[in-house]
Image: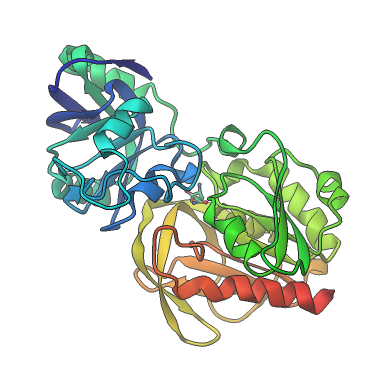
Amino acid sequence: MSVTTSANDTAVLVLEDGRRFTGQAFGARGTTVGEAVFNTGMTGYQETLTDPSYHRQVVVMTAPHIGNTGWNDEDAESQRIWVSGFVVRDPALRPSNWRSRGSLDEQLAAQGVVGISGIDTRALTRHLRERGAMRVGIFSGPDAAATPASLLQRVTEAPAMSGSQLAPEVSTKEAYVVAAQGEKRFTVAALDLGIKAMTPQLLARRGIEVHVLPATATFADIAAVAPDGVFFSNGPGDPATADHEVGVLRAVLAARLPFFGICFGNQILGRALGFGTYKLRYGHRGINQPVQDIATGKVEVTAHNHGFAVDAPLGDPVPAPADTAYGRVRVSHVCLNDDVVEGLECLDLPAFSVQYHPEAAAGPHDADYLFDRFAALLEGVK
Ligand SMILES: NC(=O)CC[C@H](N)C(=O)O
């Protein structure tokens, strides 16, 4: 990404299929490319921008007014903004919130994130729904004046999301510990594939001491923590590339350690059990997605951010395709919009995972019970 600064000016958004939108520069001026995806959350842009799972994605917000509450010191889900670009329709001219420390525009500029405003985000989202997620570029400052053909070439030269291995790029380099709140009941090793800050907090609130490990950690590194259970986080990139993590998880399952996975962690459990993963046409991103818990029939409104999904059969439990030693597995949760697999549960191992975000941040807290379910699993095998 190249960044220069200049006065407020015209910016261009170019999709890889040649569709162009013209708007105004927002945030840093310069050039950025990534995968165009849309997020349907009406709130939570700070959490979205700082979610490491958005690494290499240009996020289009479908809600028209973005930036109203500015930028605060409390809501970031990691140390920095991870999106590679940000597309909005009508940014707030002046933030207004008691926690605000500055404007979204200033924060994007300070962190070198190229954005664009004044875009018909409804037309852009409809285009992505019809044609699917695709590569995109945002060009502002002097870069916007280049010929259409050269801008399109910048976009088509960008790497595609399919086949991209990105978790090691966002993961912590050093292991760290998040202390249990109150009395310590359990120790959990959490593989950081792009972990959001809220996740260890919600584990810690259940008396869990969380040892956050880099994505490159081996099973020996996990065992060295002497954990009561193992957690795999959300993260960016194509789960088909996560061979290392799949190998580590198979060792965890063989050791019969309790396991809980979220999002990328769900896709890795799916792969470890022998299912495939595939790319969704345009993914699920937002904080208003209906998911049904098959066992109880209860519907939760949930936070999502995924472009890939596990290819496992809905209905009766099936033997894990990878190895009969893993026993039976069933799809535990399904998205009511499109029947996409939203959770997996092993019936003969203490392991389960969800494709969506029970940690919310942002989003509704309907799925908070899954952290209690993990704590019960830890209790059960202790
Ligand atoms: N939030 C996540 O963990 C996303 C997982 C994966 N990168 C996907 O897009 O499906």
Question: Residue at image x 25%, y 15%?
Answer: 5
Res 372 seen here: yes
Question: In the image, is residue 375 above or below residue 212?
Answer: below
The quarter of the image holding the N terminus is top left
- Left or right position of 239 against 45: right
- Left or right position of 270 against 161: right
Query: Residue 268 location, x and y as percent?
Result: 64, 54
Query: Residue 95 location, x and y as percent?
Result: 21, 45
Nearer to the camera, 119 or 95: 95
Residue 15 falls in image quadrant: top left
Question: Residue at image x 64%, y 37%?
Answer: 172
Question: Residue at image x 32%, y 32%?
Answer: 108
Query: Residue 276 location, x and y as percent?
Result: 59, 55
Question: In the image, is residue 323 above or below residue 315?
Answer: above
Question: In the image, is residue 128 above or below residue 323?
Answer: above
Nearer to the camera, 340 or 382: 382
- Left or right position of 51 against 217: left
The quarter of the image holding the C terminus is bottom right
